[in-house]
Image: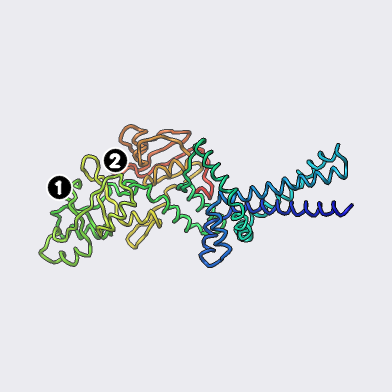
Amino acid sequence: MDSHSTTLILVLIILIILSAYFSATETAFSSLNRIRLKNLASEGNKRAKLAYELSENYDELLSTILVGNNIVNIASASIATVLFVSAFGSSTGPTLSTVIMTVVVLIFGEVSPKSLAKENAERFAMFTAPVMRGLVVLLKPVNFLFSMLKKGLSKLFKGNSSRSMTESELLTIVDEAEQEGGINKSESDMLRNVIEFDDIEAIDIMTPRVDVAAVPKDASKEQVAQIFRETGYSRLPVYEETIDRILGVIHEKNFYSYVWGTEKEIDSILKPAEYIPPSMKISTLLKLLQQNKLHMAVIIDEFGGTEGVVTLEDVIEELVGEIWDEHDTIAQESFLKIGEDAYRVLCSADLDDLFEFFRLSCETDASTINGWILEKLDRIPEAGDSFCFEGLTFSVRQVENNRVTEIVVTGKHEEPSDDEE
């Protein structure tokens, strides 16, 4: 082997290394975590800052990488052809060169470097950033031509240019962070609650009017004190004639401080109530309650009557989960297995949770389990009533004030896994 062939072989090896370098750089910048890189840059890491700046203008960087990668690949193929023609002749040399170089470039110039770069994307991006910055500057005229070509193609083939992150993508990021151990389950649950917070309406978390503890305007002090004792609530709505005419709210502390044992009436400590529509988002409701320094709002239906009430605690629980105090009775488990293919279900549970737990598919206008049962039976339910739906039997177990409070569901169904629960 003469010195000329040796030189060509050395150049070929260098070109394959450069091919691997460009391929790995492309993968590193396309798969790196920009948030993590930004945090490193804010901590004073100069290479991280440079890599982040390059990633901000990814189109120009990608153009530089592709130009460099194609130059070294074409050059390596040409040199390999010269070497193989010199060694095996013009008849078989080109064919051998094509086959061998394809395998070599795929293994050493594409697959292997890209796999390694993907596993250490941020580190490799910081390693290559200084060289890539120089190449970007060097190939500025070429990149300008490609950017003009891209704009022309974009006008010809119009596409969706929106790159804003959607809510479902944010939830996926939270799931991945939990799976990778970056956050624990309680943190991921709270993040999901925050992301989905603006999707919830006041009617979804309200206490319905049949469960609202309220006092009439002309109630005696003893009656008011008794209701405070029995419910354990710190605030009670006050109504005139019917609960559809709520006048305001009284606070237990003010009642015992300014009314109890005096000649004053409860309307002297009456605070104004906030009236809201059922469709108000709880994110808006939270701001409203904060601005007006209130802890309770009354939900008004389309006829002007009281549909229910919602408290500041109800809103906050959608973010942090259930809040229990010394006056609360711990709720029973909503779905409790009581036998072979039999479950007791409390109708205080969400209707969506019922459908999800038993893997049911149903289009309904009802928003509660009781409403869905009314819809299916087409009459006021009584204890012992039952109906079948998708292979399951739903039996009414308890009814209070014409409202179903507990049912039993029997039949074969696929139980949810631990992750789904």
Relative to 148, 213 lies left or right: left
Amino acid under disc 2: Asn
Q: In the image, what residue occupies the spot 21% across and 42% down?
A: 304
Give the camera-side residue of 312 and 144: 144
Q: How is the image coloured?
A: rainbow
Relative to 325, 96 lies left or right: right
Q: In the image, what residue occupies the spot 36% across and 42% down?
A: 368
As drawn, which residue projects farthest toward the left? 263
Q: Which residue is mark 2?
A: 402
As drawn, which residue projects farthest toward the right? 1
Which image quadrant for residue 32? bottom right
Q: CA distance from mark 2 to mark 1?
A: 23 Å
Relative to 153, 18 lies left or right: right
Please tell me which of labels 2 and 1 falls first in the chain.
1
Which image quadrant for residue 300? top left
**Spot occupied by residue 202 in the image (x, y as percentages of width and height):** 32, 48
Amino acid under disc 1: Glu
The answer to whether residue 159 is above or below residue 179 is above
Q: Which residue is mark 1?
A: 241
Relative to 238, 74 lies left or right: right
**Spot occupied by residue 279 in the image (x, y as percentages of width and height):** 31, 44
Give the camera-side residue of 370 and 97: 97
**Spot occupied by residue 335 in the image (x, y as percentages of width and height):** 44, 47
Say what secondary structure mark 2 lies in. Answer: loop
Q: In the image, what residue occupies the spot 28% across and 49% down?
A: 211
**Spot occupied by residue 257 in the image (x, y as percentages of width and height):** 18, 67
